[in-house]
Amino acid sequence: MQYRPYGADGRELSVVGFGAIVVMNETPQDASTRVAWAIDQGVNYFDVAPSYGDAEVRLGPVLEPYRKDVFLACKTAERSADKARAELEQSLKNLQTDHVDLYQLHALTTTDDIEQAFGPGGAMEVFVKAREEGKTRYLGFSAHSEDAALEALRRFPFDSVLFPLNFASWINNGFGKRLVKTAQEQGVSLLALKAMARGPWPEGVERRWSKPWYEPLDEPELGPLALRWTLELPITAALPPGEWPLFRTAVETAQALTPLSETETGQLESLAAIQKALF
């Protein structure tokens, strides 16, 4: 497994993280087997959120034996201080830990999200206190809006941003370019979502996978190509789709990571040209 620095203090994360949707709706035994496999393969970055069904409950007990050796990220979609505090405490209980390594505002999208979270009585009050209390070490956010992400970075010195960085959205629409530039200028670590996304699920097509809300690139060649493209950006790590076979593919790709050739880059550019980008 390859590792890259996160933050300014030398912490290193595996370039592929374990999105806990992988254990959502799975049996405790399957959850245990999947987490153990990931650890054995060198994965040390785990990400979860209360909105991921029963993922916290499934992840907590099976991650506990490895807790001191992994980087655990959690999120809240609550925008008020009182609700964010309640959700943080419940997440810690579900995850069977007294702290997470990274706590993130989840899915910042609109101006209202920003104003509520950063305003009086907003969730950011809890974030700052949680760091003072030792319940988190790093603070971050996830976003699917580049404008919202840039505004959040303007308002607070976050440690990281979790953001969709996908070949087709970048090539077709330039989606993510402004954020990557700003994050580099500010020394903010970047964590990537949707690297292995093809695009929206086509209407009228039976979905092959139940967990992703988008259509993933599940071909043996294309998924790894797209992931490698994203990992060539100045990012720390990427979270692959929450399906077990696709996660395994991502881990195996990361363990044999090589630069894209001109032919492979051209292949992705050709795919982007005929594809509806997710963003």
Image (cartoon, grey):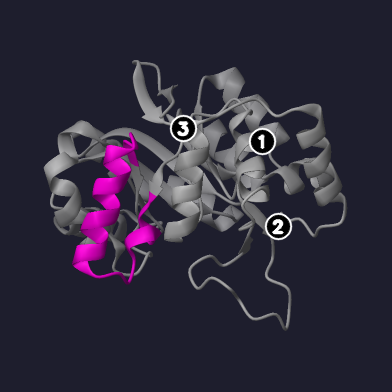
Disc 3 and disc 1 in contact, CB within 8 angstroms: no
Q: Quadrant of residue 118?
A: top left
Seen at 75% across and 27% down, the residue is 261
Task: Assign a secondary structure to mark 3.
Answer: helix
Q: On the rendered structure, is 1 left or right of 220?
A: left
The disc, 1 or 2, on the residue closer to the chain's N-terminal end is: 1
Q: Is residue 98 above or below residue 180?
A: below
Task: Assign a secondary structure to mark 1.
Answer: helix
Residue stretch rendered in magenta on the structure: 19-45
Q: Quadrant of the C terminus?
A: bottom right
Q: Could you tell me how far apart the alpha carbons at marks 1 and 2 are, in whole angstroms?
A: 16 Å
The disc, 3 or 1, on the residue closer to the chain's N-terminal end is: 1
Q: Which residue is mark 3?
A: 255
Task: Assign a secondary structure to mark 2.
Answer: loop
Q: Quadrant of the N terminus?
A: top left
Residue type pointed to by label 2: Leu
